[in-house]
Amino acid sequence: MDSESKPFSTHWADITADRIIRERGEKDVYVCASGITPSGTVHIGNFREIISVELVVRALRDRGRTVRFIYSWDDYDVFRKIPENMPQKELLETFLRKPITLVPDVLSDEASYAAHNEKTLEKVLPEVGIEPEYIYQAERYRASKYAEGMKTALDHRDDIRRQLNAHRTTLLADDWYPVSVFCTRCDRDTTRVTGRDGDYGVSYTCDSCGNAETVDLRKTSALKLPWRIDWPMRWSVEGVDFEPAGKDHHSEGGSFDTAELTSREVFGHEPPVSFQYDFVRIKGGSGKLSSSSGEVVSLSDVLRFYQPEVVRYLFAGTRPNSEFAISFDLDVLKIFEDYDKIERNYYNKPENPKKIKKWEKDARIYELSQVGAVPTTLPYQIQIRHLTTLLQIYSGDIDAVVSYLGDVPEADLERFRVRARCAWNWVNDFAPEDFRFSLRTVDDGRVDMADNLAAAVRTLGVLAVDKLGDLPEKEFSNLMYDVMHEHSLESAEFFTAVYQALIGKDKGPRLLNFLHVVGRETVSGLLGLY
Ligand SMILES: [Zn+2]
């Protein structure tokens, strides 16, 4: 939907885009930024920032604006602490206080521990349609790309100290410098700046190895700015117009507050438009997620159970400043059903003007949930519950489900397969016990049951041979109840006996539909054992 046909939307991404244009004025390019220190697995809470920016980027592009979407890896940060569950702890310990970009990758064969965390995310983001321009801070700093920014910070040393001290209980001393130094001999940041020459020269000593030297900002890879100063420096270097931040940064006196001051007063850049995003909780996933990364749930983990459009829907459909939960329990089915509903509605615009507002709201969420272009017609839909039944009947064989259905259009096949993989993973990992079943086979033989029950099951088997699939469901249903009455059974005991014969459990999917889906041959084979 373009800006001509839809000048106004109440979606938060559109409201933010309008605010950016209003506050920053008309520009050739709007710069939207996100970033993180790759000191551990980038988890789904961190992903909220990335997708929040991407949704605003889309809203700006939908308004015909050109946008640069940058993602900064703060990989020149120091390796402070070894994350839990890491192998080779003794080796890693020797890299403490060094930049994370120098820490070896003990989990795979990337160039460094930082690169491992970076590549892991970079590989998965395109699956949800997110492809920012990545900026690697270590590379920039080590190539002295920020020499002027660091000099500006040093020139305003007293201003910055005052700005930071306004929010500190332990005040920064008069001999404090707004830079940190990685010793060029031992790579550790266990250093103290001892002076500067007023130009580009900075002197330091290292408490670890005793190294003392003077380096030139334009030539050295040793210096960087601490986070609270690095952030506004980059806003000015990249010309950032929009960057949201988490609750921790947006608190009173938090890094966003001081960065705003430093950006304005030291770097002469009007700080970007921002908003605060809230946490993402995890519901019903305990113990079965992310064995490799402790209790952290990553985007890849979520994508095992939710198709990309539904992941986007979760974030696009929730205001950034409200906390929400990603569920792995039965709610998963409800969320797929909700998504399918807004998808159907999107292609069925109401005539009634009273209903238009609600329709427009959901339509915009649907558009923003798409990975690529919005489909021109309603994509193939399959109810998630029905899909879990089919997958269990066919033991997870997606091709078999596709040929059973026989009507999945070629164009929707990949989307269908992705949904089927998610549904099957969910059945195996998180579906409640009474939801799961597997079809018995004739080779399994009979299940023990009373003679009168076995006789009823046998009669139903004969009926299946004659009629299942030929008669409409309703008519087959009447005949099935006739069998039940003929054998003087209550429906509970009759149904239990049939489920026992088919899946060895007392309960299962809705019986009539289940018999039809399982099909004449298998039903009559299994019931014919009695
Ligand atoms: Zn040293």
Image (tube, rainbow, N blue to C red):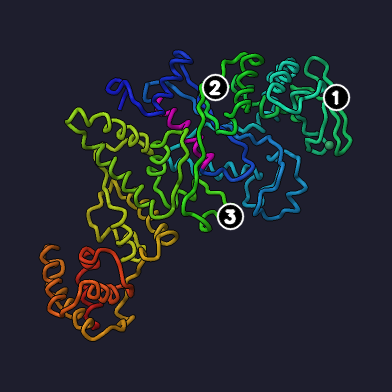
> What segment is highlighted magenta in the picture?
45-60
In the image, residue 289 above or below residue 494: above
Q: Residue 292 shows which numbered tag?
A: 3
Q: Position of residue 429 (x, y in %)?
A: 45, 60
**In the visual, does 453 lie left or right of 282?**
left
Disc 2: which residue:
240
Label 1 crowd bin: few (<14), some (14–19), many (20+), radius 10 Å:
some
Per the model, the C-alpha gap separating discs 3 and 2 is: 35 Å
Instruction: Sort mark 2 into few (<14), some (14-19) or many (20+) by Cα contacts within 10 Å.
Output: many
* Secondary structure found at label 1: strand
Q: Position of residue 345 (x, y in %)?
A: 25, 39
User: Residue 351 location in percent, x, y?
Assistant: 17, 31
In the depicted structure, whether residue 298 falls above or below residue 236 = below
Q: Is residue 29 visible?
A: yes
Query: In the rendered view, does 243 fall on the left or right side of 164?
Result: left
Q: Residue furthest bottom?
A: 451
